[in-house]
């Protein structure tokens, strides 16, 4: 059959629905590619071939019977491991959740199943979404398929890597501070962070609840638009879910951008931006102007405070959200937190003298178990962020840090609101550099955090943004162009991205 790497979802689904292609053939070819390529990349954490084949066969059966099939019929899709999948292990790439198999599907997974997509498996990530390189995974480090000595970005690095390697046609990521857009930029694919509330968060393992947003990832803009149309919309299971109507994101893709007012934030094109990235993004802006857009400079004056405010607020939310992981009901239970620390009676071999945690009072044994589980189950970066978050929420520091950061967040949102009174869209780099080498920044948390300097303001404001390729650096690594829109401006963003992609090639 045809090479899967050359297929798009918007071409593949109609051919499967018509019977021209078999979903099972596509699934088997995808599994073959995973088996062949993934050992060098580690994009996937869990794949169940028997389930993949069974789902594909069901699509073929219904096509043959003339029954209705969904808009993504037979299309293979990879799922970030922060999203609950019934019957398939979901770990957030952390040892503390190793072995956890959810008894239910996240809303976005249920909607994918209704659309008849074929779920391939769970993709690698930084633990609980905490990282910008995928080096903070609790398992094997995921590598960039374009250069396996480099990172794929984070935290949705596995999803981006699977798309770039051709081992998935579509993917879901989750973006808290750039976790869809940054790996999309590093791997040369398309990734969209929707407006906060546009896509349900029910069934997503929380990191920062006022930031987290599931979004589509694909190898082209049209596929990204189609996937967003499937997962978007109100969900009564998520109280933050918006009831705003979902448009047909593909209906206006080809209208072009003539007359659109595009703003270029001066703060995003300043010191610290790699020369090749600046040049490529500059050429992209010129291309959009040639397509009929009206370009002007705008100011987002509080951008310089975004990273500091973000890492106060998101770590505070993480310290609260991750408090539930204690090793009692599911997940990791350390050696010192096993049966003895759980309060059981001494075994026959221990008769005549209990040792270790058994010698402690029950309340102390419980504390010992919690300490063992959390210190061993959580990775270094997760523990760092939990401690930071606990500190900024503590008595005497709440007003100085957390409350002040919330005020800065309001100012940053105000910057975007004012900018969108003047322009229709903003265009900027996705990241200050291209994909860096594995090990380059893992020992310097501040430098790693600054990788998110152009993405975290969007999450603080809750507005949507897309990243798509706009060129390559001297090492042939892809450069990401970020297009930012007002709240619920996904349709406009996708239209601009499609026009640019058509003018420059995918």
Image (spheres, rainbow, N blue to C red):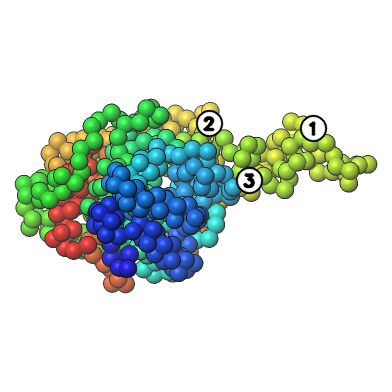
Quadrant the C terminus occupies: bottom left
487 above or below 270? above
- Residue wearing tag 1: 361
Image quadrant containing the N terminus: bottom left
Identify the image quadrant of residue 474: bottom left
SS type, badge 2: loop
Circle 2 residues within 10 Å: few <14, some 14–19, many ≥20: few
- Residue found 42% across the figure and 35% down from its top: 202
Q: Which mark is residue 332?
A: 3
Q: Is residue 341 left or right of residue 489?
A: right
**Percent x, y for residue 222?**
22, 52
Asked if residue 43 is positioned above or below residue 393 in the image, the reply reads below
Residue 293 in picture, x, y percent from top left: 8, 50
Kindly report the distance in space between the C-alpha atoms of the residues bearing marks 3 and 2.
28 Å
352 left or right, relative to 465 = right
* Marks 1 and 2 close (CB-CB < 8 Å): no
> Which one is earlier in the sequence, the residue at label 1 or at label 3?
3
The residue beneath circle 2 is: 394
């Amino acid at each position: 059959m045809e090479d899967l790497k050359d297929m798009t979802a918007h071409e593949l689904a109609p051919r499967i629905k018509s019977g021209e292609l078999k979903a099972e053939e596509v699934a088997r070819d995808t599994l073959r590619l995973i088996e062949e390529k993934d050992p060098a990349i580690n994009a996937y954490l869990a794949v169940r071939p028997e389930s993949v084949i069974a789902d594909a066969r069901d699509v073929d059966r219904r096509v043959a019977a003339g029954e209705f099939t969904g808009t993504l019929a037979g299309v293979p899709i990879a799922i970030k491991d922060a999203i609950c999948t019934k019957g398939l292990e979901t770990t957030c790439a952390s040892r503390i959740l190793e072995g956890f198999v959810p008894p239910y599907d996240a809303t976005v997974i249920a909607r994918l199943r209704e659309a008849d997509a074929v779920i391939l498996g769970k993709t690698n990530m930084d633990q609980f979404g905490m990282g910008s390189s995928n080096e903070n995974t609790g398992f094997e480090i995921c590598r960039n398929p374009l250069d396996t000595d480099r990172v794929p970005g984070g935290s949705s690095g596995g999803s981006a890597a699977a798309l770039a390697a051709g081992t998935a046609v579509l993917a879901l990521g989750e973006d808290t501070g750039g976790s869809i857009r940054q790996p999309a930029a590093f791997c040369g694919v398309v990734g969209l962070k929707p407006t906060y509330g546009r896509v349900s968060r029910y069934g997503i393992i929380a990191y920062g609840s006022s930031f987290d947003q599931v979004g589509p990832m694909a190898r082209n803009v049209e596929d990204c638009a189609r996937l967003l149309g499937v997962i978007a919309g109100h969900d009564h299971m998520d109280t933050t879910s918006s009831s705003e109507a979902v448009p047909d994101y593909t209906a206006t893709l080809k209208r072009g951008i003539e007359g659109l007012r595009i703003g270029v934030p001066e703060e995003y094109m300043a010191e610290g931006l790699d020369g090749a990235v600046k040049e490529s993004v500059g050429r992209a802006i010129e291309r959009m102007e040639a397509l009929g857009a009206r370009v002007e400079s705008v100011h987002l004056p509080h951008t310089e405070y975004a990273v500091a405010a973000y890492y106060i607020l998101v770590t505070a939310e993480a310290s609260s959200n991750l408090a539930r992981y204690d090793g009692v009901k599911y997940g990791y239970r350390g050696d010192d937190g096993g049966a003895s620390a759980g309060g059981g009676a001494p075994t026959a071999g221990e008769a005549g003298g209990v040792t270790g945690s058994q010698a402690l009072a029950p309340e102390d044994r419980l504390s010992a178990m919690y300490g063992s589980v959390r210190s061993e189950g959580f990775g270094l970066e997760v523990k760092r962020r939990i401690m930071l978050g606990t500190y900024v929420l503590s008595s005497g520091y709440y007003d100085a840090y957390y409350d002040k950061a919330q005020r800065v967040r309001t100012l940053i949102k105000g910057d975007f609101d004012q900018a969108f009174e003047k322009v229709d869209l903003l265009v900027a780099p996705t990241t200050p550099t291209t994909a860096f080498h594995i090990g380059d920044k893992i020992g310097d948390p501040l430098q790693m955090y600054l990788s998110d300097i152009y993405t975290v303001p969007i999450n603080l404001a809750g507005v949507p943004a897309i990243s798509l390729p706009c060129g390559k650096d001297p090492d042939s690594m892809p450069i990401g162009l970020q297009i930012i829109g007002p709240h619920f401006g996904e349709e406009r963003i996708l239209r601009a991205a499609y026009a640019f992609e058509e003018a420059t090639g995918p």
